[in-house]
């Protein structure tokens, strides 16, 4: 016969069911979850940043080796949330220095974090901020074995060197050990083609063709000549429209006054005697009528 009570995994008596109790999460994991909640749910970016900094301080003071996988993942997670919080707070200028405070050296920053920094500074047009940091990271031999090394090299060439017009440095990187490790021969050939296109663009900007400049100037003159009549026609149409609107408004006001006069005075002659205030209105309308049309009738009478 089955007993009515069963022993739970915690060693106490249960109420008929076995309770599975998972081990409590570590404080660092709880800190990451709290920071993400502040960032994504509550939209409290300053609180998210403060939580990340506290979590990073606790990780730094913990007696764990830097090579520990869990320790590194927690540190990277807190750093990524902190970068996003800084960007939301419009403090993106201090992102790289903030990351360096956590890792000490550029070469020790994980690839996914430095990739985020590249995309952030590229988005705001500050390519030069990341140039030296990424170059040092790529030149470090210990980073060549990381999974994101090829992506880092690609971002460095496409989003930093070429936009800055540094084609010579891009070619040198492709032919160096970095290019040999990061790219295949086909990829290096495609990158060389992009570098050649950037060279042509730089040359056209520094030494513009006089003929192309003259063609562009003539097109601009023709466009302005065509635009001037259109603008004059548009202004004339607007002025006519405004006059028409004013005349329509005056017509409507005059028509309303005349209808009121006909309805209250002409349609019922006995009504003014019953309502004295209508007599005052009748006198006012009569005065307006004499003022507006009296000279016209007098002139016709004389003729």
Image: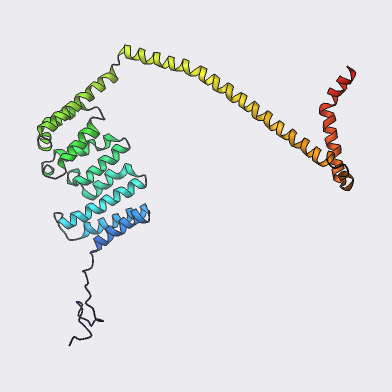
Report the residue at 33% width, 47% height from top.
Answer: 86
Direction front: furthest residue: 267
The spot of residue 55 in percent (x, y) is 27, 58
- Color encoding of the figure: rainbow
Residue 52 sits in which quadrant? bottom left
Q: Is residue 158 left or right of residue 187?
A: right
Residue 57 sits in which quadrant? bottom left
Report the residue at 86% width, 37% height from top.
Answer: 283
Instruction: Give the mark count.
Output: 0
Report the residue at 15% width, 39% height from top.
Answer: 150
Out of 32 and 40, give the one closest to the viewer.
40
Q: Is residue 164 left or right of residue 272?
A: left
The spot of residue 241 in percent (x, y) is 61, 26
Out of 162 and 228, give the one closest to the viewer.
228
Out of 73 and 64, give the one closest to the viewer.
73
Out of 130 and 152, give the one closest to the viewer.
152
Q: Is residue 278 left or right of residue 222?
A: right
Residue 124 sits in which quadrant? top left
37 vs 213: above or below = below
Q: Looking at the figure, which quarter contains the C terminus?
A: top right
Q: Looking at the figure, which quarter contains the N terminus?
A: bottom left
The spot of residue 21 in percent (x, y) is 22, 72
The spot of residue 233 in percent (x, y) is 55, 20
């Amino acid at each position: 016969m089955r007993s009515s009570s069963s022993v739970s995994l915690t060693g106490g008596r249960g109420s008929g069911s076995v309770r599975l109790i998972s081990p409590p999460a570590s404080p660092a994991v709880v800190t990451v979850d709290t920071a993400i909640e502040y960032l994504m749910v509550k939209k409290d970016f300053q609180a998210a940043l403060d939580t990340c900094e506290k979590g990073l301080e606790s990780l730094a003071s913990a007696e764990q080796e830097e090579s520990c996988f869990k320790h590194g993942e927690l540190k990277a997670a807190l750093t990524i949330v902190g970068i996003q919080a800084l960007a939301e707070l419009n403090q993106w200028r201090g992102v790289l220095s903030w990351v360096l405070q956590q890792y000490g050296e550029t070469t020790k920053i994980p690839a996914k974090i430095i990739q985020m920094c590249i995309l952030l500074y590229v988005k705001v047009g500050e390519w030069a901020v990341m140039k030296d940091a990424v170059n040092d990271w790529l030149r470090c031999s210990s980073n060549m074995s990381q999974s994101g090394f090829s992506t880092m090299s690609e971002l460095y060439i496409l989003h930093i060197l070429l936009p800055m017009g540094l084609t010579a440095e891009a070619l040198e990187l492709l032919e160096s050990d970095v290019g040999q490790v990061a790219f295949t021969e086909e990829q290096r050939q495609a990158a060389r083609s992009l570098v050649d296109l950037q060279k042509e663009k730089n040359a056209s900007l520094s030494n513009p063709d006089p003929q192309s400049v003259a063609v562009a100037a003539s097109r601009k003159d023709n466009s302005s000549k065509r635009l001037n009549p259109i603008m004059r026609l548009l202004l004339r149409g607007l002025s006519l429209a405004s006059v028409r609107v004013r005349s329509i408004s005056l017509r409507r006001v005059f028509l309303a006054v005349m209808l009121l006069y006909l309805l209250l005075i002409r349609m019922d002659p006995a009504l003014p005697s019953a309502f004295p205030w209508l007599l005052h209105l009748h006198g006012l309308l009569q005065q307006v009528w004499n003022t507006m049309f009296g000279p016209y009738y007098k002139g016709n009478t004389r003729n």
